């Protein structure tokens, strides 16, 4: 039986290959005699990953996995999982700007049925698990000072549990280095197209040995990110914040006077601070432990909205106010829209080498706290006409405005223990137990600043219940979820021969959810408290066979399952705004995945992966809104599937030039009709709409481009005693639908795009001076568009767009 001892290294691996079949065919004619140069190439292109909970050469993992090393991450400008998605085919991140990070979802292989445009937070569990080291919830932290990032495609339910429906992403931080004092400081400044501001940032790290057995590593950074959206028609408000009452142009005529307004350029700026502190203790050769703390702080204004289709004109409520024609990076909105998010994670990783196996423990505590405000005036005005007098008064308030705020707090404790065999026998095994406890609170508020004062003017009548004077809060919807997960899992690999491996895996789990929610809608006299709970238990399985048909070349078949937990919604059960009780809960969903692939390494060090997959998705969870009252809910569809092919290749074209490239083709669609009920806005259960929201067999799944690809060229050469490094990266995402086709929303297909990044660095001793360009061709990328049908288009046809071209210089010093 052949075993490989692989070194730990953060060497760059890309994954993916457009046109790779011809390249692989040509390589198969390489000589079987491996000279020393070829052996060096093989070693240099060996990448070790720990996705299977033990160190393995990436070409031995029996499913499609991509690993990016620290050099590739730095040169391509990856700082977040959103950036990472631009380097990985078949990975999509729904994006409504950093303001709505809590609503961001990662999608792999098209397994998503929720709309791309999400505000506040998304209620259903992420369909892709994200980890920082061995602890979940990494997507709230920046990608910096990392050894590598591993992207595991396909369901990973046995080893990674709930949420690994489409795959998993692991950010592997650089551990403190024993016996070595080292550090780095860097600063950068950049120009942003369509902006008069500058991007600025500083980063640093320090590795300090504490004797021979311990070390501490501190890394962190601060970024001041320039805005590029110009906003028109912002109202001046009492107290200066977005929830203050508007200041009138003509206080003597409060019934008709417009608000004082102003414009602001580059409004969507942001600041962020990220710090990681890690303490490692390894007193002997059989015990190793690392205690780490990560924090992330971000705040700014957003979102990344523009309304290029709006040609200007009078305000719909105050015709005397006229707005200009807005362009590609301009928007009309009554309010500033600030946000902030604070996230912390403390984790303890410890391992004990028992000789025959290693016992590992990961304990983590994660917290995040976020608030975001966005304007929702036009959406409220699109509610049924019978509602509007309750909100606007009679006559209607000409300064009616709605600012919505979403608050969320999440505290998660996890404990995992694993026993992993040493890989030296005929059988290998992984045994583990997992416990998670989560307390999650989210609240959605609606405010109409100034409405209380307007309702009390002479000549104004109201038909609603009295408003609260403080902030004139319209509604409060939200509550607390208490969730627990208890799991045991294991995998057993039988090395049936020197070339054939068979793996069997399973995970048994029991989950409980308790939900308590408050629903307050002042206008309609609704004050409700709703409680419900749900339990789920199941077993998920995995089978894999891997055959090494030639040295370092393998064929594999994998059957794997993934799942997400169920949950509960919160909404009014009475009055105009009532929704049917059938929507109060939604069920878990699951995936059965079948995958056949080839992967390996040639004598000259080139690596490749090719696979075909079919994923059958049962009871897909869909986040959305009810049809009439527009309450946020999650519901289940019936059946869906995703199928496709993926190619990956990487290696050295010459001694100084390397290539990595890849391509994926995916078809993701519903395979069975479904319909979901909704209230009718009358308060009468007899009027409920049985199929208010529906899905049709064959409808493409949202945010699932059929084609995606990436290609990267890296060049490195000595220049005297210095080194010159250059990198060019291009990534392509095909067009994709933004939502399932329903009668209550526009059916929008967002266009495809290419994004290019470039890097040029000069290393002179301890100094590195580099120039970079992100979005080199200044592509205007549309991530999502407001899909709701209202009478106010195109004023409310918000497009969420990506950052334009940024070009900058960075200077770093290492010791």
Image (cartoon, rainbow, N blue to C red):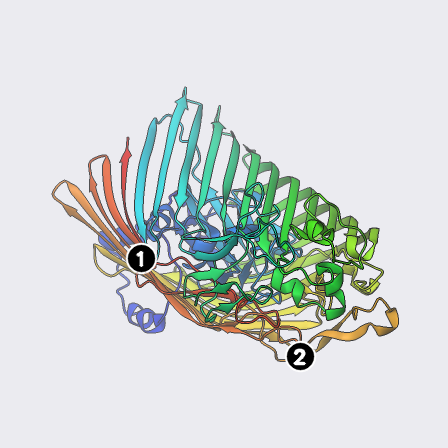
Judged left or right of residue 585, residue 557 is: left
Q: Earlier in the sequence, mark 1 or mark 2?
A: 1
Q: Residue furthest front?
A: 252
Image vertical order of residue 284 relative to residue 344, above or below: above
**Residue closer to the observer: 734 or 250:** 250
Determine the image quadrant of residue 464.
bottom right
Q: Which residue is mark 2?
A: 696
**Residue closer to the observer: 464 or 677:** 464
Q: Residue furthest left?
A: 720
Judged left or right of residue 718, residue 80 is: right
- Disc marking residue 605: 1
- Disc marking residue 181: none
Examine the rendering and report whether any part of residue 782 can be seen: yes
Q: Position of residue 710 (x, y in %)?
A: 38, 64
Q: Position of residue 184 (x, y in %)?
A: 32, 33
Image vertical order of residue 464 relative to residue 276, above or below: below
Image vertical order of residue 639 relative to residue 545, above or below: below
Q: Position of residue 547 (x, y in %)?
A: 49, 63
Compute the Cα span from label 1 to label 2.
Answer: 48 Å
- SS of the residue under disc 2: loop
Q: Quadrant of the C terminus?
A: top left
Q: Residue at x 63, y 64 (%)?
A: 379
- How dense is the environment of label 1, judged by Cα within 10 Å: few (below 14), some, or many (20 and up)? many
Q: Position of residue 354 (x, y in %)?
A: 56, 33
Q: Nearer the viewer, mark 1 or mark 2?
A: 2
């Amino acid at each position: 039986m052949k075993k490989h001892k692989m070194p730990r290294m953060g060497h760059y691996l890309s994954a993916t290959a457009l046109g790779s079949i011809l390249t692989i065919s040509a390589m198969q004619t390489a000589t079987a005699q491996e000279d020393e140069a070829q052996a060096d190439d093989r070693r240099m292109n060996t990448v070790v990953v720990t996705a299977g909970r033990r160190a393995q050469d990436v070409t031995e993992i029996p499913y499609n996995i991509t690993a990016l090393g620290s050099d590739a991450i730095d040169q391509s400008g990856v700082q977040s999982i959103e950036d990472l998605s631009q380097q990985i085919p078949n990975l999509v991140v729904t994006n409504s700007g950093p303001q709505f990070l809590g609503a961001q979802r990662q999608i792999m292989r098209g397994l998503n049925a929720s709309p791309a445009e999400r505000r506040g937070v998304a209620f259903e569990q992420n369909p892709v698990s994200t980890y920082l080291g061995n602890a979940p919830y990494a997507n709230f932290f920046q990608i910096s000072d990392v050894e590598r990032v591993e992207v595991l495609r396909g369901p990973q339910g046995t080893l990674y549990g709930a949420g690994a429906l489409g795959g998993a992403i692991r950010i592997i931080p650089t551990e403190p280095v024993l016996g070595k004092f080292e550090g780095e400081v860097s600063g950068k400044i950049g120009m942003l197209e369509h902006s008069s501001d500058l991007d600025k940032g500083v980063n640093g790290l320090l590795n300090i040995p504490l004797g021979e057995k311990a070390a501490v590593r501190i890394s962190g950074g601060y970024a001041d990110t320039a805005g590029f959206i110009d906003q028109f028609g912002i109202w001046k408000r009492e107290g200066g914040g977005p929830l203050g009452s508007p200041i009138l142009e003509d206080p003597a005529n409060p019934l008709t006077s417009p608000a004082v307004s102003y414009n602001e350029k580059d409004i969507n700026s942001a600041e962020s601070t990220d710090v990681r502190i890690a303490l490692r203790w390894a007193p002997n050769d059989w015990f190793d432990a690392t205690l780490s703390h990560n924090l992330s702080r971000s705040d700014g204004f957003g979102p990344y909205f523009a309304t290029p289709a709006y040609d200007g004109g009078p305000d719909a409520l105050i015709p005397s106010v006229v707005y200009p024609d807005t362009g590609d990076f301009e928007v009309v909105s009554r309010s500033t829209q600030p946000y902030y998010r604070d996230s912390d994670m403390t984790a303890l990783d410890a391992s004990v080498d028992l000789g025959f196996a290693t016992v590992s423990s990961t304990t983590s505590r994660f917290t995040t706290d976020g608030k975001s405000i966005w304007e929702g005036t036009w959406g409220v005005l699109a509610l049924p006409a019978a509602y509007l007098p309750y909100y606007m008064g009679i006559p209607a308030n000409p300064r009616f405005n709605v600012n919505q705020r979403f608050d969320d707090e999440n505290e998660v404790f996890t404990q995992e223990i694993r026993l992993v065999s040493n890989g030296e026998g005929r059988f290998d095994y992984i045994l583990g137990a997992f416990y998670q406890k989560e307390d999650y609170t989210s609240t959605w508020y609606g405010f109409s600043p100034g409405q209380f004062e307007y309702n009390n003017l002479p000549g104004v009548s109201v038909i609603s219940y009295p408003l609260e004077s403080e902030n004139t809060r319209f509604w409060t919807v939200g509550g607390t979820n208490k969730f627990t997960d208890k799991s045991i899992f294991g995998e057993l690999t039988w090395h049936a021969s020197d070339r054939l491996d068979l793996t069997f895996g399973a995970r048994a789990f029991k989950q409980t959810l308790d939900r308590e929610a408050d629903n307050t809608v002042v206008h309609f006299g609704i004050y409700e408290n709703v409680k419900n709970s749900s339990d789920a238990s199941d077993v998920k399985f995995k089978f894999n066979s891997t055959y090494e048909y030639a040295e370092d070349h393998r064929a594999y078949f994998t059957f794997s399952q993934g799942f997400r937990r169920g949950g509960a919604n919160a909404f009014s059960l009475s009055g105009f705004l009532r929704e049917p009780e059938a929507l109060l809960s939604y069920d878990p969903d699951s995936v059965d995945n079948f995958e056949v692939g080839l992967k390996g390494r040639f004598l000259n060090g080139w690596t490749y992966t090719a696979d075909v997959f079919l994923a059958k998705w049962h009871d897909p969870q869909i986040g959305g809104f009810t049809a009439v009252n527009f309450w946020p809910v999650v519901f289940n569809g019936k059946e869906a599937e995703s199928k496709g092919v993926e190619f990956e290749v990487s290696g050295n074209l010459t001694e100084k030039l390397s290539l990595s490239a890849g391509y994926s083709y995916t078809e993701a669609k519903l395979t069975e009709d479904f319909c979901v009920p909704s209230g009718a806005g009358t308060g009468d259960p007899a009027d409920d709409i049985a199929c208010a929201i529906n899905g049709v067999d064959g409808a493409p799944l949202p945010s699932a481009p059929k084609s995606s690809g990436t290609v990267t060229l890296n060049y490195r050469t000595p220049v005297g005693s210095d080194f010159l490094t250059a990198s060019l990266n291009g990534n392509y995402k095909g067009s994709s639908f933004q939502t399932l086709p329903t009668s209550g929303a526009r059916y929008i297909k967002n266009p495809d795009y290419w994004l290019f990044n470039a890097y040029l660095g000069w290393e002179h001793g301890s100094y590195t001076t580099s120039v970079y360009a992100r979005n080199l061709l200044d592509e205007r990328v549309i991530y999502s568009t407001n899909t709701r049908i209202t009478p106010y288009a195109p004023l409310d046809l918000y497009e969420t767009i990506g950052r334009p071209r940024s070009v900058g210089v960075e200077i770093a010093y290492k010791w």
